Image (cartoon, rainbow, N blue to C red):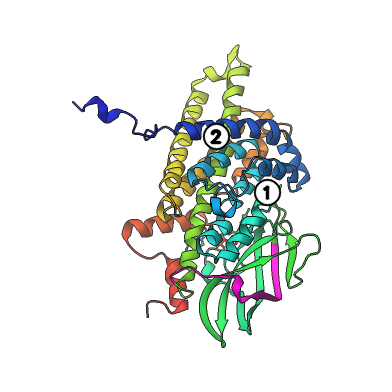
């Protein structure tokens, strides 16, 4: 028989399946803030489609904006797992606020804090800690899943780059200050590869004038955050605002996309939080609603739905926590991030739908939160890498082959020559 000691929690208090004490305490604190100060505004944020600045103030006060920024830059040096716990609780209360927590701790911020020069890190940290949710600008009208086919170009001229092109579906367009723009870099008319370009926009004056916010998409869900077109019209970016990962600009896109693994785990966590809150509503309703002289929870058809919802949520949470916990000081692993996002986002679509079904007609009413949660969940198998593209990545890892996106990108950039 295995000695009992082998089953004891390891020093530090965490077993494989339990959060350490300090993270549990943090989770309790976030849950309280989320339920008392964020949740009461969620329906209004959805209805008005306005950016929830009042929620940002709460996040700022609690030190949740830029929590993952290292201590030397004024943040708390929080781990990905801690950020995931924050996002999960916030997303249960309000999906828009959950997404603000993702983008103020991962995504563009993660890329700059990892690959940026010191001055770039200081700039990014200061903006986020002051309440900014950075924007990451990759997708273009003709380059969605095939992101490496982007045509936005940055031409070197003197001590700067001149950007021209168009992005769309940019989260935070019009409200974000910090922008990380992915563009094809040219020097002496010769293409170098894809790099990140830091641009700071003043939402009040609209400066710099070469960065133009285009039309807003009338999105289905998570309506508190705008998704817009962003155009570059001879936008000047100083040379020292370029972000290039250590592998160099030619293979820079792959490095920048590593930073996106964090964003994917974060997006999966928002989906998880939305689904968990829908499940909790369904459980409560199934216990209270009576038909045929008994609570509907006594009908086996609904019991099996609830059981499946609970199992799927537990599995999604395990994949997310695993990807986040194993990130350590770096970014989550590409395959683990993809697996977590695929499963959590598809689970969220199923679970929110089933939760609505359990509510019968009341689920279909805009007076309850279910129809909003169904709409909110739907974005996650699409945004930040579709479930199909991420499956291709997982398959690539299993089979040891390059995914089509990477292969096309490398061919275009001439790598592997
Ligand atoms: P397409 O690439 O045109 O795909 C259409 C369909 O074809 C999809 O079902 C896709 O899975 C499938 N498909 C394509 N290629 C393959 C393949 N090789 N194998 C199998 N199936 C394939 N982008 C940003 O840069 N910044 C943002 O802040 C941002 N925020 C977003 C927020 C929201 C709410 C949404 C919906 C999108 C956001 N996006 C953002 C864009 C998002 O990342 C893209 O929508 C996504 O990468 C897919 O691109 P696409 O929409 O052009 O779809």
Farthest right residue in view:
205
Task: Name the residue located 68 percent from the left edge and 28 percent from the top edge.
Answer: 362
Query: Which quarter of the picture shows residue 209?
Result: bottom right
Q: Is residue 410 above or below residue 377?
A: below
395 versus 255 height, above or below = above
**Percent position (x, y) of residue 189?**
57, 87
- Mark linked to residue 267: none
Residue drawn 52% across the image and 25% down it: 302
Decide which of 29, 162 is in the foreground and name it.
29
Q: Quadrant of the N terminus?
A: top left
Compared with 166, 259 (above or below) is above
Residue 308 located within the stretch drawn in magenta? no
Q: Are marks 1 and 2 in contact (CB under 8 Å)?
A: no
Q: Is residue 240 magenta?
A: yes
- For mark 2, give the secondary structure: helix
How far, Cα to Cα, is label 1 from label 2?
32 Å
* Residue position for label 2: 26
Residue at the disc numbered 1? 220
Q: Nearer the viewer, residue 349 or 267?
A: 267
Extent of the magenta region: 229-247
Q: Nearer the viewer, residue 303 or 209?
A: 209
Outermost residue toward the front in this view:
72
């Amino acid at each position: 028989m295995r000695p009992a000691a082998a089953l004891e929690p390891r020093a530090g208090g965490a077993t494989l399946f339990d959060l350490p004490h300090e993270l549990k305490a943090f989770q309790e604190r976030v849950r309280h803030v989320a339920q008392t100060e964020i949740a009461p505004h969620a329906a209004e944020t959805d209805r008005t489609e306005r950016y929830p600045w009042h929620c940002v103030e709460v996040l700022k006060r609690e030190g949740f904006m830029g929590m993952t920024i290292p201590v030397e830059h004024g943040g708390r040096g929080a781990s990905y797992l801690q950020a995931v716990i924050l996002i999960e609780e916030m997303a249960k209360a309000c999906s828009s606020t959950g997404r603000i927590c993702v983008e103020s701790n991962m995504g563009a911020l993660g890329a700059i804090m990892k690959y940026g020069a010191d001055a770039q890190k200081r700039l990014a940290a200061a903006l986020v800690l002051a309440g900014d949710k950075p924007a990451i600008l990759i997708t273009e009208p003709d380059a969605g899943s095939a992101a490496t086919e982007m045509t936005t170009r940055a031409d070197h001229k003197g001590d700067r780059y001149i950007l021209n092109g168009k992005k769309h579906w940019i989260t935070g367009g019009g409200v974000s200050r910090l922008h990380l723009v992915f563009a094809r870099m040219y020097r002496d008319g010769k293409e170098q590869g894809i790099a990140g370009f830091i641009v700071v926009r003043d939402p009040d004056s609209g400066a710099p004038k070469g960065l133009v916010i285009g039309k807003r998409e009338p999105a289905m869900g998570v309506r508190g955050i705008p998704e817009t077109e962003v155009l570059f019209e001879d936008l000047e970016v100083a040379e020292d605002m370029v972000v290039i990962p250590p592998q160099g600009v030619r293979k820079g896109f792959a490095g920048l996309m590593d930073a996106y693994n964090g964003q994917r785990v974060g997006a999966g966590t928002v989906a998880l939080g939305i689904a968990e809150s829908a499940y909790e509503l369904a459980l409560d309703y199934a216990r209270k609603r009576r038909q045929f002289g008994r609570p509907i929870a006594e009908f086996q058809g609904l019991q099996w739905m609830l059981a499946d919802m609970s199992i799927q949520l537990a599995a999604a949470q395990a994949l997310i926590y695993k990807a986040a916990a194993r990130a350590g000081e770096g970014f989550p692993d590409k395959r683990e991030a993809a697996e977590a996002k695929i499963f959590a986002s598809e689970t969220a679509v199923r679970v929110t739908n089933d939760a609505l079904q359990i509510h019968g007609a009341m689920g279909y009413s805009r007076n309850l939160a279910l129809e909003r949660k169904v709409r909110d969940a739907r974005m996650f198998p699409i945004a930040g890498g579709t479930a199909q593209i991420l499956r291709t990545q997982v398959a690539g890892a299993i089979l040891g082959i390059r995914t089509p996106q990477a292969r096309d990108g490398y061919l275009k950039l001439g790598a592997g020559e």
